[in-house]
Image (cartoon, rainbow, N blue to C red):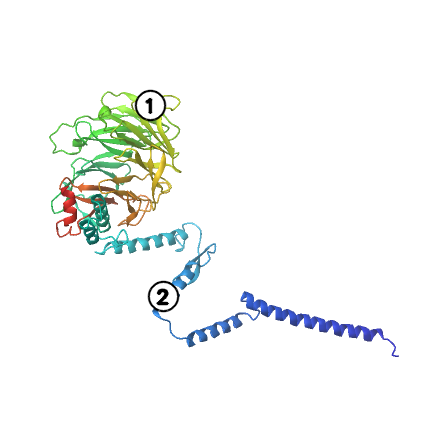
Amino acid sequence: MRKWNWREGQRQQRRQGAGQRHGWYRGSRRRSSQDEQWYGYNDAGPSHRASQRRYDNQAASSSPPPTPSSSSSSSSSSSKASSAAPELPGFYFDPEKNRYFRLLPGHNNCNPLTREQLQEKEREKQRHKMLAEDEKPRKKAPRTGLNTSLLLQRRHLGLLPENSYCRLVHEVKVSGMRRHKLEIQSNDNSSPNTDNFRLIVGDSVCERVFTVNDVAHGGCKYGIMNFSSSNRGSLSVEMCDNLYFTNRKVNSICWASVNYPDSHVLLCLVGVADTPGCVSLLPASLFSNSNPDQPGMLCSFKISTAWSCAWCLNPQFDKTFSTGLSRRVIVKDAETGRTQTYSVGSDVLAQQFAHRVPVLYNGCRSGEIFSIDLRQRGRRDQSWKATRFHQESAITSVRVLQDENYLLAADMLGQIKLWDVRGTKPVQEYKGHYNEHAYLPIHVNEREGLLLAVGQDCYTRLWSLKDGHLLRTIPSPHPAANDLIPSVVFSSNLGGCRGLPGLLMAVKHDLYYFPYNTDYQDGGELEAGLSDYNEK
């Protein structure tokens, strides 16, 4: 028997341990190679990944060339991949160059890459693209398969009721409107208009448009433009002689029928410094030197912080107007001066009277919409509120339809809803409007079945009043800015009884006309379908 030596025993243990460690290392290497297949990662480093890419490129080059369908699908997949690039804080991914660029926070003039500038650049790119599409003679139909010849064929076959035919014809006409710049004629041609339009409001027949312009030194000027139209559809614009200047801001405007329809203009002026705010009732003849008529009623009421105003056309209260203030509503008789005050819990930003009954609808900053029946006296417990319902944000505009059971309301979340005031529930929503904090009106033309609104993004959108379908989006001719939001007027007879349906847009210091007549520049006649409709 061999004698045990402790040194040899330790040597053997070390050999076994080395073998175990060596085997464990090889096993771990095998496991890491399996993990490499699972995670797409290995320890070989960039050179191995480069070799893998070279192998993939060789395999791709040996494959047959792609077909047009496969190339389009690959390009769409690559565009999706670029658009799906992860967003890294402080970096911007350019899909064209397929790489990231560093961003600096805030508005830095030394750094051309700020997130705000990149977003503005993308918006401008989209606006120019839409302007180019609008210049095309053939535009996309507002609905699938909708065109004039198909509508006429279905009408002759008795498959389309007359009301639906007229409404759909207007939708086709709206989609084909093209932009034309109007020249404003004035007695003083030596000084062209260089002040930006802030607001335009047309009278009931759209022969006159009240305008408010911002002036460079602060404040604003206001006046009246006269429109006249020929039977060929040409539209001419003439500015009245007298323009009035004020250092106060004009918050709201409406036409007032004191002596005859649209004889006056009701203005809400916000106070500035030592100058208090007021509500002024001005005769329209005041803005023209050539008018031999007497100016008529001219009065001003010192009412501070007036947000909105409305004139009542109901025969029982035909000399009555209202103003929406901070937490108050004032109803006043313009002849007798009799005043009635209603206390509310929020600022009243929008108002309109119903026609058949003397009911005033109000929209508040809190999102509440309520009505006041003028035949009831005010009470302290607010039980005079005939109808109450809410939207999610501050109300910017309310419009009562001809069927006075329905009311349109827009808010500062960009929501436009049609409400049934009997059940105080929304029955239709018009999606696509954009607003975050601006005081923007909405416009309704029930004869053509259209709803219009200009968003804070400076896009003018037109919807079908019946079903809420977005018919068209019109970009602004100028870059978007908070102080360059277009103001629009839409009328069935723009320029008087011989006028055509069309859209009037004022933006910056320019005035644009979007007529139904596609041959406007050539002075063409209306198409047969629309002419028949106007004769009815």
Label 1–label 2 contact, CB within 8 A: no
Above or below, 260 relative to 41: above
Residue to which mark 2 is pinned: 72
Please state which amino acid type lies under the numbered disc 1. Answer: Thr
| Residue nearest the viewer, comparing 35 with 87 | 35
Kindly state the secondary structure of the residue where label 2 is placed: helix
Which quadrant would the N terminus be assigned to in this image?
A: bottom right
**What crowding class fits label 2: few (fewer than 14 Cα within 10 Å), some (14-19), or many (20 or more)?**
few
Name the residue that disc number 1 marks.
341
* Up/down of 423 relative to 229, above or below: above
The residue that appears at 50% across and 74% down in the rendered structure is: 51
Where residue 360 appears, as percent x and y from the top left, is 30, 29
Task: Give the vertical position of 5 relative to 442 (above or below).
Answer: below
> With respect to residue 515, does 53 lie above or below?
below
Looking at the rendered image, the quarter that the C terminus falls into is top left
| Residue 134 in the figure: left or right of residue 35 | left
Q: Nearer the viewer, residue 350 or 110?
A: 350
Tell me the SS state at disc 1.
strand
- How busy is the neighbourhood of tag 1: few (under 14 within 10 Å), some, or many (20 plus)? some
Horizontally, is 146 left or right of 233 in the view?
Answer: right
Q: Nearer the viewer, residue 155 or 380?
A: 155
Q: Distance of mark 1 from mark 2, alpha carbons? A: 67 Å
